Amino acid sequence: MPMIRLRLIGNRDAADTIISVLHGIDGIEHVEEIEDFMLGMRDDSSSAQLVDDSEGKVFMVEVEAPDDMRAEAVRAVAETEARRLDAGLEIVDGEDF
C-alpha cells in the first residue's frame, strides 16, 4: 500500500479542508495529521517574514492509499486544493518527513 506524506504550509482551516477532501477520495481510509516536534526549531535568527514568522503554520499529513492509482489521485487532489486555498504543499518521502 502506497504511503503519501504531505507537508502543508498555511492556516488551520486550509489544513483541515485538505484533510477532509482527502478523506473523501474513494478507497482512502487512512488520513492522519502527524505531530513533528522539530517544526518549532529554527536554524536562523532572521525576521524576514519567513513562513513561521507570519500566519502560516506547517502541518504534516500521512495518507495510506490502497493502490498506485489512488495514491496519484491523492497527490493531484492535494495539489489542486492547496493551490485553491493559497497554501503551500510539498510531497515528501519518508526520509524527509
Image: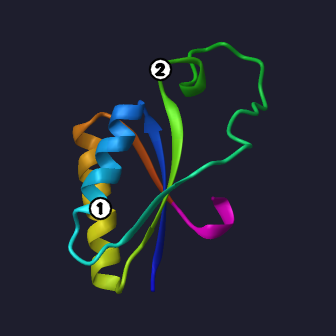
Residue topped by disc 1: 23
Looking at the rendered structure, the secondary structure element under dot 1 is helix
Q: Earlier in the sequence, mark 2 or mark 1?
A: 1
Instruction: Measuring from the top left, give residue 19's x and y in whole percent.
Output: 35, 52
Quadrant of residue 66 within the rendered picture: bottom left
Q: Residue at x 61, y 14 (%)?
A: 48
Please tell me which residue is depicted at 31% across the width and 66% down the height of the picture.
74
Question: What residue is shown with label 2?
Answer: 55
Q: Nearer the viewer, residue 23 or 3?
A: 23
Q: Assign the N terminus to one quadrant of the image.
A: bottom left
The picture places residue 75, in percent across and down from the top left corner, at 34, 64
Relative depth, front residue between 48 and 16: 16
Colour option used: rainbow
Q: Residue at x 68, y 39 (%)?
A: 39
**Is residue 38 depicted above or below 28 in this figure?**
above
Quote the CA–CA distance across marks 2 and 1: 25 Å
Amino acid type for the residue under numbered disc 1? His
Q: In this view, does 72 lie above or below 47?
A: below
CB atoms of marks 2 and 1 within 8 Å:
no
Q: Is residue 94 above or below residue 90?
A: below
In the rendered image, the residue lying farthest to the front is 29
Q: Residue at x 65, y 60 (%)?
A: 96
Neighbour tally class for label 1: few under 14, some 14-19, many 20 plus, Cα within 10 Å:
some
The magenta region covers: 92-97
